[in-house]
């Protein structure tokens, strides 16, 4: 009885196990839908999609390509003038301080002019004395000329008497001795006339000498008056007081510096430019100036001077840049950053990373390592042909121009608006199928 019951339980256990294993067997025999669909498609239908290379695509566009190197310098006034004493004496007044704005012709300082006034008065007195002297000489000349006229009349009378006595002597009316005496008197009168005329000439020469002495003394008077005017120190220009070299009450000598003025109607910056970059700088060329004192502003300037000589050690060339400063707020000693604007032709510009070959030749070397242009070379990049799933990469040979900051100009072989591959997930060959990444420009 027990054995019969055990057999029944064993049979039922086997039936239950079979029922559990049946679904598993059936599932292992079934064919997935995707595999079934794949079997219905022609061979290689998905091969192109699985082998398409992901690429980032950009559109070629023109843009200028120019370097933006900056050179540092320090602002200076457009003109700087040292105001020096032109007269000797005690400094009685000094009316301005450092930082004061002055106008052209403004009184800056005054030197004690008492000694200058005395010297001027002495020179004027000497001039008056010499004018009086020439007056006396002119009076003497007038007297001498009167005497000459009288002597001429006497000579005429003596010559008339001599002629008359000579006639009478020939007629026997008087003796020959009397006629000879009359002739002698005429000769004496002629000699007196010549002497009087010589005296007039001498005194006329004295007048010329006296006049020259008066002119010389007049120059002395003018000089002393000018020295007295130098006691009033006027501003030679409109600007700002940069330095004050002395104080009121000091004794100053001719040539001592009193003040230093700066004309800030324009500001000047001198920068040291490498001889390798000098070709990018031209006289009168436009520049951009940034001042750390005004970080949000940019000032326009021009190249006003290029030194003809470079430093023999550093090979740097001083270049002077001038910028307008109508408000005068740009002072002296401010740190300046100058960049020279270069004229650049707009061409198609692409990243250097888009080039597929000859990259080594496109990199700047030697003197051109600092963001400068290189000679055009040849390179290769890929452009996109067709759209969607039929997009393919086509190799294109291009000419290369300037290369700055990781970008290169395309001077031939790529037109604006064409699509090119900026980056690919793996190396490409001509005709490879590609698919555009989400970063691509459509």
Image: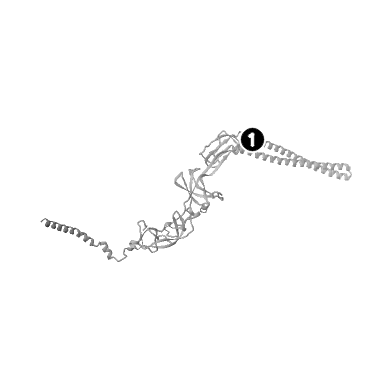
What residue do we see at 69% from left, 41% from top?
Answer: 212
The vertical placement of 30 against 248, above or below, is below
Q: Residues within 10 Å of mark 1 (few under 14, many from 20)?
A: some
What residue do we see at 64% from left, 35% from top?
Answer: 119
Placement of the C terminus among the 4 image quadrants: bottom left
Q: Position of residue 158 (x, y in %)?
A: 82, 42
Would residue 262 be seen by someone viewing this image from the given angle? yes
The residue lying toward the viewer, choosing from 189 and 67, is 67
Horizontal relation, residue 386 to residue 287: left or right: left
Q: Position of residue 334 (x, y in %)?
A: 49, 43
Q: Position of residue 336 (x, y in %)?
A: 48, 46
Would residue 351 be seen by someone viewing this image from the given angle? no
Q: Residue furthest bottom?
A: 42
**Helix, strand or loop at disc 1?**
helix
Q: Position of residue 201 (x, y in %)?
A: 75, 42
The vertical placement of 45 against 194, above or below, is below
The residue lying toward the viewer, choosing from 65 and 180, is 65
């Amino acid at each position: 009885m027990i054995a019969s019951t055990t057999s029944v339980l064993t049979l039922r256990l086997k039936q239950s196990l079979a029922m559990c294993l049946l679904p598993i067997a059936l599932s292992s025999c079934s064919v997935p839908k995707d595999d079934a669909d794949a079997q219905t498609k022609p061979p290689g239908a998905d091969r192109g999609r699985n082998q398409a290379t992901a690429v980032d695509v950009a559109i070629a566009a023109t843009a200028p390509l120019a370097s933006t190197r900056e050179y540092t310098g320090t602002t200076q006034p457009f003109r700087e003038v040292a105001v020096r004493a032109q007269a000797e004496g005690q400094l009685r007044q000094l009316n301005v301080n450092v930082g004061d704005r002055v106008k052209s012709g403004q009184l800056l300082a005054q030197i004690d002019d008492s000694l200058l006034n005395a010297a001027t008065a002495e020179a004027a007195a000497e001039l008056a004395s010499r004018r009086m002297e020439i007056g006396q000489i002119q009076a003497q000349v007038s007297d001498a000329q009167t005497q000459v006229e009288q002597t001429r009349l006497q000579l005429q009378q003596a010559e008339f008497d001599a002629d008359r006595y000579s006639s009478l002597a020939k007629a026997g009316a008087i003796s020959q001795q009397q006629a000879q005496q009359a002739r002698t008197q005429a000769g004496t009168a002629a000699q007196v006339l010549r002497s009087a005329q010589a005296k007039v000439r001498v005194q006329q020469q004295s007048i010329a000498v006296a006049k020259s002495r008066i002119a010389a003394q007049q120059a002395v008077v003018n000089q002393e008056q000018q020295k007295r005017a130098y006691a009033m120190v006027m501003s030679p220009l409109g600007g700002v007081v940069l330095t004050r070299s002395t104080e009121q009450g000091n004794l100053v000598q001719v040539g001592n510096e009193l003040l230093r003025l700066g004309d800030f109607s324009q500001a000047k910056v001198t920068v040291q430019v490498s001889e390798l970059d000098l070709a990018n700088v031209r006289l009168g060329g436009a520049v951009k100036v940034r001042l750390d004192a005004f970080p949000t502003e940019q000032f326009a300037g021009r190249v006003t001077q290029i030194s003809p000589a470079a430093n023999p050690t550093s090979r740097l060339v001083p270049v002077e840049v001038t910028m307008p400063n109508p408000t005068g707020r740009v002072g002296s000693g401010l740190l300046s950053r100058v960049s020279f604007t270069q004229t650049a032709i707009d061409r198609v510009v692409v990243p250097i990373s888009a080039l597929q070959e000859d990259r080594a030749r496109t990199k700047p070397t030697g003197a051109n390592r600092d963001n400068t242009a290189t000679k055009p070379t040849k390179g290769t990049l890929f452009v996109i042909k067709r759209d969607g799933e039929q997009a393919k990469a086509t190799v294109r040979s291009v000419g290369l121009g300037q290369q700055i900051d990781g970008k290169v100009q395309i001077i031939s072989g790529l037109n604006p608006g064409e699509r090119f591959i900026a980056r690919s997930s793996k190396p490409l060959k001509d005709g490879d199928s590609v698919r555009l990444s989400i970063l691509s420009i459509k």
